[in-house]
Amino acid sequence: MPASGTFSEDLADVIDLNALGAHVTKTITYEKRSGNPTPRVCEVRGSMLNSIGIPSKGVEHFIQNVIPFYKDYDVPLVVSISAYSADDFARLCEAISVPGVDAIEVNISCPNIEEDGKAFAIRPSSTQHVMAKLRGASDLPLWAKLSPNTGETTEVALAAQEAGADALVVANTLLSMAIDTRSRKTKLGNLMGGLSGPALKPVTLRMVYQCTKVVDIPVIGCGGISDAEDVLEYLIAGASAAQVGTATFIQPTAMPTILQDLVNYMEGRNIAALTELIGSVRDSDAVDAAVFMETAP
């Protein structure tokens, strides 16, 4: 499935949207938002930085104009939402729980004004607080999108599950920075932004592995997926599904290409279903995962 922010209705002119496992929309907010100052995107070696700032036309526009478009497809619609406080998250979650929406991906990796701008998913306590508010606002499945900018990966994952998350999306972008050495100015108008693309994958792959060791809910791998090999790594690490983001900017047909390559991989190895691969990493001879997570710097 696509990662939020990298998918729009325009792709219907390029690929068969019915071939995807789900449609994940660009993140929306309750009110209209213009987003961050430009430049919002820059290329770095092997990856990219973005500081889009979640521009949004608001929830009412989304309900009236975007949801009807996806009703023509026999694929679950997952709406990504963002807010600055737990109460605002709950208000938006309730407003977007309408017919046509199958699940809500909650971007708790965004700033939390109640915690001096720190993302909800940085700490277990703030994760638990916001997810409990969200769970009380909707009966739809809730996917908590976690952040790689935390040193408490497993604790945050457990807090999200305990507060009612039905799945985890692991993970969002990594806070990063780039500077133009000629002008000595930062390459993004908002100074810092999120790193995505191949450089992010080793970080989020590690997070997926750690999370699947402690939670009972599905984990969706997200970060740096460019081809079928990347998807296979996530599945073997324990992910139940995968999201493709930056690769679609480079090649709009990346997702159907990956799907076909996965079929070819299965047929070449007599694998009946990809579920056979989930969590199949051969780690019994490695350092015990629980011990590693307790002792790693």
Image (cartoon, grey):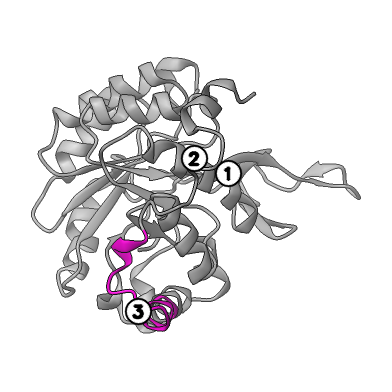
Magenta stretch: dominant secondary structure: helix
Check contact, mark 2 vs mark 1: CB within 8 A. yes
* Res. 123 mark: none
User: Residue 272 lies in magenta, yes or no?
Assistant: yes
Q: Residue, x 44% and y 46% (percent of image)? A: 54
Spot occupied by residue 171 in the image (x, y as percentages of width and height):
46, 44
34 and 122: which is toward the camera: 122
Q: Which residue is mark 2?
A: 207
Q: Is residue 71 left or right of residue 203?
A: left
Residue extent of the magenta highlight? 261-277
The answer for how far apart the CA atoms under marks 3 and 2 are is 29 Å
Q: Quadrant of residue 141?
A: top left
Q: Quadrant of residue 243?
A: bottom left
246 and 233: which is toward the camera: 233
Q: Quadrant of residue 173?
A: top right
Q: Residue, x 91% and y 50% (percent of image)? A: 182
The answer for how far apart the CA atoms under marks 2 and 1 are is 6 Å
Check contact, mark 3 vs mark 1: CB within 8 A. no
Q: Which residue is mark 1?
A: 203
Q: Which residue is mark 3?
A: 270
Quarter of the picture containing the N terminus is: bottom left
The answer for how far apart the CA atoms under marks 3 and 1 are is 31 Å
85 and 16: which is toward the camera: 16
Q: Secondary structure beneath disc 2?
A: helix
The three-letter code of the residue at mark 3 reads Asn
Spot occupied by residue 259 in the image (x, y as percentages of width and height):
39, 76
> Local crowd at mark 2 within 10 Å, few (<14), some, or many (≥20)?
many
User: Residue 37 lies in magenta, yes or no?
Assistant: no
Residue 26 sits above or below residue 213 on the image: below
Please indicate, yes or no, whether residue 50 appears anywhere in the rendered image. no
